[in-house]
Image (tube, rainbow, N blue to C red):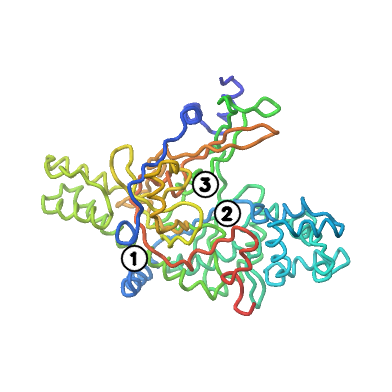
Amino acid sequence: MFNDKDLLQMNNRGIDLNVIQKQMDHFIAGFPYINLVRPAVSGDGILRFDDEQLSFYQSYFEEHLPHLKVVKFVPASGAASRMFKHLFEFVEKYVADEDGFAFFTKDQGFNSVSYFIHHLEKVAFYHDLSAVVAKSGKSIEQLIVSQEYNTIIDGILSPDGLNYANLPKALLKFHQYSDGSRTAAEEHLVEAAAYTKDHSKIARIHFTISPEHREKFMELFEKVKSTCELRLDVKFDITFSIQKPSTDTIAVDETNEPVRNPDGSMLFRPGGHGALLENLNEIDADLVFIKNIDNIVPDHLKETTFQYKKLIGGYLLFLQRAIAGFLGRLEKQASPADIIEIVEFAQKKLFLDLPGDLGTYPIVDQVRFLFNLLNRPVRVCGMVKNEGEPGGGPFWILGNDKKISLQIVESSQIDLKNPAQKAIVDQSTHFNPVDLICSTKDFKGNPYDLTGFVDENTGFISLKSSGGKILKAQELPGLWNGAMAKWITIFVEVPIITFNPVKTVNDLLRNEHLSPNS
């Protein structure tokens, strides 16, 4: 199946043949569905803190933060093109003459386009767009009156305009302020200053980016960094990394034969956000916050986000220190009384499934079991009440090891044709907003190799098209799904206001993304 040129191509990408063969096995056999036991809900897998607890853990985090190295990790390589799907469709269908326009207004997709066009003055890039559109000899208002929507859309998407169709979301202007507008990336700087600043006033943030956009990121931060630092009384340590070619996955046709490029080389595709585990694995920090690039709000709404970031941070620190203490005792051969205390903590605080007959094990085996159970990366994940958003959620699942654990599960991992599994999904109450904080070092301060805590059976296969042909693509276990399946996982309820993603450009017109005076 693979020739010498294939092996050389793999070697140049840093991919071992055994990895490719495992991918081929997954294409042939598929990935097994997750076995849901029940949804994680408040009081059963999801913690809900009252105001007193919120204040305590927030203060706990603030007290320890100056002495910690905290990094905010932001996946920022995603293209913005999907934000403008309805605009692209409009341009494809739009006919310049009056009858054509009237015909298109009957299309369901027209309403969202029309709403966006007629509220353009509220979006943060309005003034930039006005300057671009002026080249046509008309203002935006004149183009709206004459129904020349395609000229406006072209000004937003084309390389001769703002070129937003070819930029990552991070570089798009999201919010308008009295002193100017901010991109999504700039808003993440503001957040990082609020909950990563140490005693030296250094705030650390790491963006994963595409290589073709590195220069534009550098230009942006060179332009805004000093002003932002002065305003926030902070020094930013901004770092970048690229998704590694070694994490790309092979593509196959419908007969599971490798798809080849015109030159005969194998076609590889990005492995999804699970590939970023390699990038996360190289972050040197005591704590790492992870948040999606498009989930940010203007300044007047940030305070609640800051409170709950500090809450989950404080709670993780509390757990981290308790776990470290228990591991220290286990390393010195814990007493029977220690073991009873550790078992209760593992079950009640960490929601871990322990063997019912653990107490019958020889003491040395109990110690070994508990040490391995606790000596793992830890994550605390914010969960919001589900209000109809698509995507993953928190569940109790039964693993191949017959142990029950808390996991974030995507809908693609669930057999929704199974009535029992579908019923469990229908009972779920919360949604994963990708709002988590991670402890990636052991109790002695040594970094874990995060690749050792992945469930390899939680990948995903999808159908794509290339050159008019159908191909099968494979995504690695998701960064906050299977890639962290063997971590210690804690779920905490956070308010819905902390989740305000921008999935389409129209979302920028929601109240949560507008300035108070809009």
Name the residue at 52% across, 37% down.
461
Residue 365 is situated, as x and y percent measured from the top left of the image, at: 17, 40
Task: Mark 2: give few (<14), some (14-19) or many (20+) Cα within 10 Å.
Answer: many
Asked if the residues shown at circle 1 and circle 3 are in contact, with their CB atoms under 8 angstroms apart, the answer is no
- Image position of 154 (left or right of 38): right
Going from the N terminus, do you reach mark 1 or mark 3 first? 1
Q: Residue 225 bears which disc, if any?
A: none
Tell me the residue that label 2 is attached to. Answer: 76
Going from the N terminus, do you reach mark 1 or mark 2 first? 1
Foreground: 97 or 404? 97
Q: Residue furthest right?
A: 137
- Image position of 513 (left or right of 394): right
- Image position of 32 (left or right of 396): right
Residue 345 is situated, as x and y percent measured from the top left of the image, at: 22, 56
- The amino acid type, in three-letter code, at marker 1 is Arg
Q: Is residue 418 above or below residue 445?
A: above
Q: Nearer the viewer, mark 3 or mark 2?
A: 3
Q: Nearer the viewer, mark 1 or mark 3?
A: 1
Q: Nearer the viewer, mark 1 or mark 2?
A: 1
Tell me the residue that label 1 is attached to. Answer: 48
Q: The N terminus appears in which quarter of the rendering?
A: top right
- The amino acid type, in three-letter code, at marker 3 is His
Asked if the residues shown at circle 1 and circle 2 are in contact, with their CB atoms under 8 angstroms apart, the answer is no
Name the residue at 60% across, 78% down.
516
**CA–CA distance between discs 1 and 2?**
30 Å
Where residue 123 sits, quadrant-wise, is bottom right
Residue 90 is situated, as x and y percent measured from the top left of the image, at: 74, 55
Residue 168 is situated, as x and y percent measured from the top left of the image, at: 64, 54
Task: Mark 3: give few (<14), some (14-19) or many (20+) Cα within 10 Å.
Answer: some
Tell me the residue that label 3 is attached to. Answer: 273
